[in-house]
Amino acid sequence: MNPVMTSLIISSLAIGTVVTMSSHHWLLAWIGLELNTLAIIPIIAKQHHPRATEATTKYFLIQAAASATVLFSSVTNAWMTGIWDISQLTNQPSCVMLTMALSMKLGLAPLHFWLPEVLQGSTLKTALIITTWQKLAPIALLYLTHHSLHQTTLLAMGLMSALVGGWGGLNQTQTRKIMAYSSIAHLGWMASVLTIAPNIMLLNLTLYLLMTTSAFLALTFSSSKTVKDLTTTWTASPAVAALMLVLFMSMGGLPPLTGFMPKWLILQELTLHNLPTTATIMALSALLSLFFYLRLSYTTALTLYPTTMQNKLKWRFQPKLKTTVMTTTMMLSTLLLPTTPMFV
């Protein structure tokens, strides 16, 4: 892609999110969402492949429908109350419509079906943008309107997302689809605590962005598109293979690692608000996710798949990539648990 075009698209992507996050007026927020969607379309479509075209079409249709619903809910609210301020969302039907529209934008269950398919049709770097940067604007709108949102709806969607994210990832062999279901499960945890403790949701979001970025950078470094590809990571770098093992365990939420922190705080918050059943189901759903993360850890650093080749090295070597950002984010993704008291 032309460097001028690339810089224009990336800056539009950044501006769209920043406009949505900093706006107080519904129309400005909607313009930011649209700019964001239109900027990511050429990034997904730049691969000349039918899967990329299909992914682009699916992404565009879903995001356009969700944006239209956001606009419709804000117009309905303004019609009934005469107020365009984002924080003054008081009309109940508008609240429900907005929740569903933003859930569709994020990929929360039961509106999640587009996310694994779109990620599978994208490159690993594009998938990283979709699962991290593209989540910021909708989550910012949910955060700004959290006091108006319907708690039961969000709890139900959060529970469903955590379960779907766990079950969906169990049978996958493609790393991008596994990361998509991982994203759905993490978003489920965020949705469940959004109306109860929005600050814990923001902490969860920060750690999710950190861990997902680390995972995608590691997958890009080892050029692993399937679980089988992960077994040759050690040939590129034994240190990265060891770090990936710990990173996947952290994403699963095992105690001595960073990923345990948000789960611990969310379960504590749900219990304090007299929601023990929800907390129990969420904890059990984490076991489903943990299973496929452990499978990834095992295949990354502890085993080799059966192969007809005698050579254990990759036959096509990758150019040396700079690993500074990846190792830094990986260390943060695994070692931040002792800082928990600062956030409570």
Image (cartoon, helix red, strand yellow):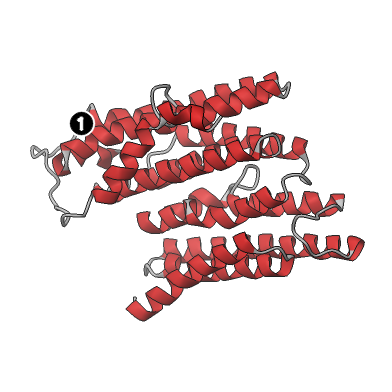
Tell which residue pokes out farthest to the left in this image: 310
Could you tell me residue 281's position as x and y percent?
62, 23
- Name the quarter where the N terminus is drawn: bottom left
- Name the quarter where the C terminus is drawn: top right
Marks counted in the figure total 1
**Quadrant housing residue 227:** top left
Could you tell me residue 14's position as x and y percent?
49, 66
Residue 67 visible, this orientation: yes
Could you tell me residue 91's position as x and y percent?
87, 53
Which amino acid, by three-letter code, is at mark 1? Leu
- Left or right relative to 106: residue 91: right
Tell which residue pokes out farthest to the front in this image: 342
Q: Nearer the viewer, residue 61 or 67?
A: 67
- Left or right relative to 285: residue 176: left
Residue located at (36% from left, 33% from top): 334
Reading the image, the residue beneath label 1 is 304
**Quadrant housing residue 48:** bottom left
Q: Within 10 angstroms of label 1, few (less than 14), some, or many (20 or more) residues? A: some
**Quadrant housing residue 84:** bottom right
The vertical placement of 74 against 243, above or below, is below
The vertical placement of 5 against 152, above or below, is below
Dot 1 falls on a residue whose secondary structure is: loop
Could you tell me residue 3's position as x and y percent?
33, 77
Residue located at (32% from left, 40% from top): 330
Q: Nearer the viewer, residue 24 or 239?
A: 24
Residue 289 visible, this orientation: no
